[in-house]
Amino acid sequence: MTVALSMTGLGMQSASAAEAAVPVPHLKSYSVDATSNIRTSPRLRKDNIVYTMARRGSMDIDCWTRGDDANSGGHHTNVWYEGSVWTGSRYLDDVYVWGGNVGTPHDPPSGLPHC
């Protein structure tokens, strides 16, 4: 049995394995637009594109960061999301998608951690 210890005020308290479970780092999946470029960094260089979405997909977002500024399709932002993208046939992990191509309510959504 694994026991985790947590700081509570001035003392220490043990917790069961279930109580010590770490939450999933992303809030939820968001849509990714068709023709979006999936990249290895939050930069607009062509040499960091690992995949271009053939159709709309989904992304499990771990965190957001600031990167190259882009202005496309009426959306202007320098927010990028890091996480895993479902292409329709496989997952691409630890990749970046520009905020204008991700269906979040705003960039970045409240509560989403900064990378």
Image (tube, rainbow, N blue to C red):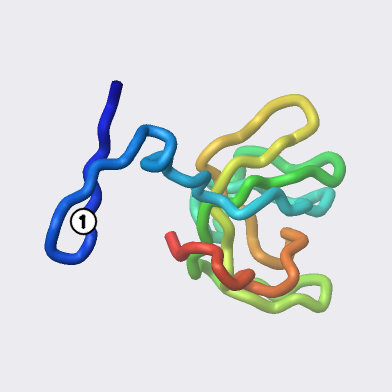
Quadrant housing residue 18: top left
Report the amino acid beneath label 1. Met
Q: Which residue is pictured at 81% across the width and 49% down the height?
A: 35
* Quadrant (top left, top right, bottom left, bottom right) of the N terminus: top left
Tell me if mark 1 has few (under 14), some (14-19) or many (20+) residues whose alpha carbon lies within 10 angstroms of its own.
few
In the rendered structure, the answer to whether residue 105 lies left or right of residue 11 reads right
In the rendered structure, the answer to whether residue 26 lies left or right of residue 2 reads right
Say which of 15 and 99 sits in front: 15
Q: Which residue is pictured at 64% across the width and 73% down the height?
A: 107
* Image location of residue 87, percent across then percent down: 74, 35
In the rendered structure, the answer to whether residue 45 lies left or right of residue 15 reads right
The residue pinned by badge 1 equals 7
Say which of 51 and 112 sits in front: 112
Does the rendering let one see residue 47? no
In the rendered structure, the answer to whether residue 98 lies left or right of residue 56 reads left
Residue sitting farthest toward the left: 10
Q: Is residue 70 above or below residue 2?
A: below
* Image location of residue 58, percent across then percent down: 75, 45
